[in-house]
Amino acid sequence: MGTTRTARLPRAAEALADQLAATHPLDRVVYRGGARVPVRAWAEAAALARIAVVYNTGTLTVACEHFVQLVELFDGLDCGWTSHPGPDKATRSLRTIEGAADRLISHHRCRWGFGLRPEAITTVGGDVAGCWLGDSGPVSGPSYPSG
């Protein structure tokens, strides 16, 4: 059996922290607000964020490959879509592929994830909505017979 995401995280964080230490003589990362965070804690958060972005991008890519146009968002019950305390709650909401691609994660240590909803179809101007595929931009959805 393969290792779990959390089992791989410490090695990824350790490697990132070691790389930073070899390149720059620092033991703390200073945030814009002045907070000083140990480089190993920062590396763990950065590795976790990168894993989440890659995982969520993969989910959206699979959605596009199978012409799924909507995903269900999974997150904490009180987490908002555009800001953490926002009124538009994220969890259990349906989002377009394009909307989800604009917000692959919300913040560091985010539990944000997408589930495919193939039964839900959305239309834009009467046409089946397009699909996001990374840097290649939107692509057309499948052709559906009319009538």
Image (cartoon, rainbow, N blue to C red):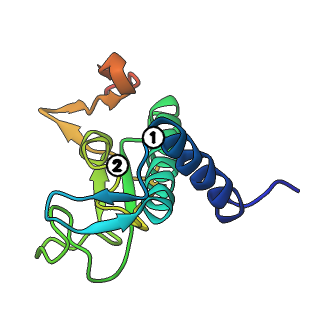
Residue shown at the point (47%, 65%) measured from the top left: 41
Q: Where is residue 77 in the image (x, y as percent from the top left)?
A: 33, 82
Q: Position of residue 36 (x, y in %)?
A: 29, 67
Which of the pair 68/79 is nearer the observer?
Answer: 79
**Quadrant assignment for the C terminus:** top left
Q: Which of 100 and 121 is in front in this view?
A: 100
- Image-based side of 90 in relation to 109, left or right: left
- Density class for disc 2 (Cα within 10 Å; few <14, some 14-19, many ≥20) is some
Q: Residue furthest bottom?
A: 78
Task: From the image, tell me which residue sits under label 1.
Answer: 57
Q: Name the residue under label 2.
A: 104
- Image location of residue 61, percent across then percent down: 48, 34
Q: Specify whether residue 87 is in view.
A: yes
Q: Any mark on residue 2, and which?
A: none
| Dot 1 amino acid type | Thr
Tell me the residue at 13%/64% (across/down).
Answer: 33
Q: Residue at x 46, y 47 (%)?
A: 50
- Mark 1 vs 2, N-terminal side: 1
| SS state under label 1 | helix
Q: Is residue 60 above or below residue 42?
A: above
Q: Image height check: is 110 above or below 122?
A: below
